[in-house]
Image: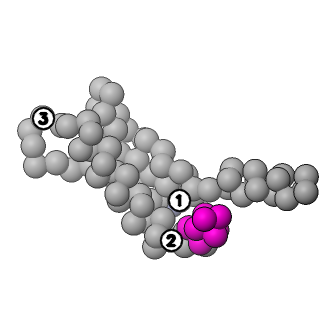
Amino acid sequence: MDNVETFGTLRAMKKSALRVTKWLGDIPIETRCSFCPETLFHAASPHHCPQKAEYIERLQRAFDSHVADCHREEIAATDAGH
Ligand SMILES: [Zn+2]
């Protein structure tokens, strides 16, 4: 049983994550996937004044779709725990 728990921890550590590469004050404007250094996500907004919550949501959504496209195995592993 101990081995199973250790395996679960290792799997969690290998999960891809959203990393912020550029900040505008305290607002993230560019992020990347922790697994794919070349994959950058930009938060573009039609507004003149950047909205922090909106930018975070845009970047999170772009990252989610990237994970769905490129890291399906991780999602499958996560969903299996339901
Ligand atoms: Zn990735």
Q: Residues within 10 Å of mark 2 (few under 14, many from 20)?
A: few
Mark 3 CB within 8 Å of ligand 1: no
Q: Which disc number belongs to residue 70?
A: 2
Q: Is residue 25 above or below residue 69?
A: above
Residue beneath label 1, please?
36
Residue beneath label 3, please?
49
Magenta region, mostly helix, strand or loop?
helix
Which residue type does callout 1 highlight?
Answer: Cys
Disc 3 is placed on an element classified as: loop
User: Taking 5 as reference, is 76 left or right?
Assistant: left
Q: Which disc number belongs to residue 59?
A: none
Disc 1 is placed on an element classified as: loop
Residue 25 picture quarter: top left
Q: Residues within 10 Å of mark 1 (few under 14, many from 20)?
A: few
Foreground: 32 or 52? 52
Q: Is residue 67 above or below residue 41?
A: below
Mark 2 CB within 8 Å of ligand 1: yes
Segment tinted magenta in the rendering: 74-82
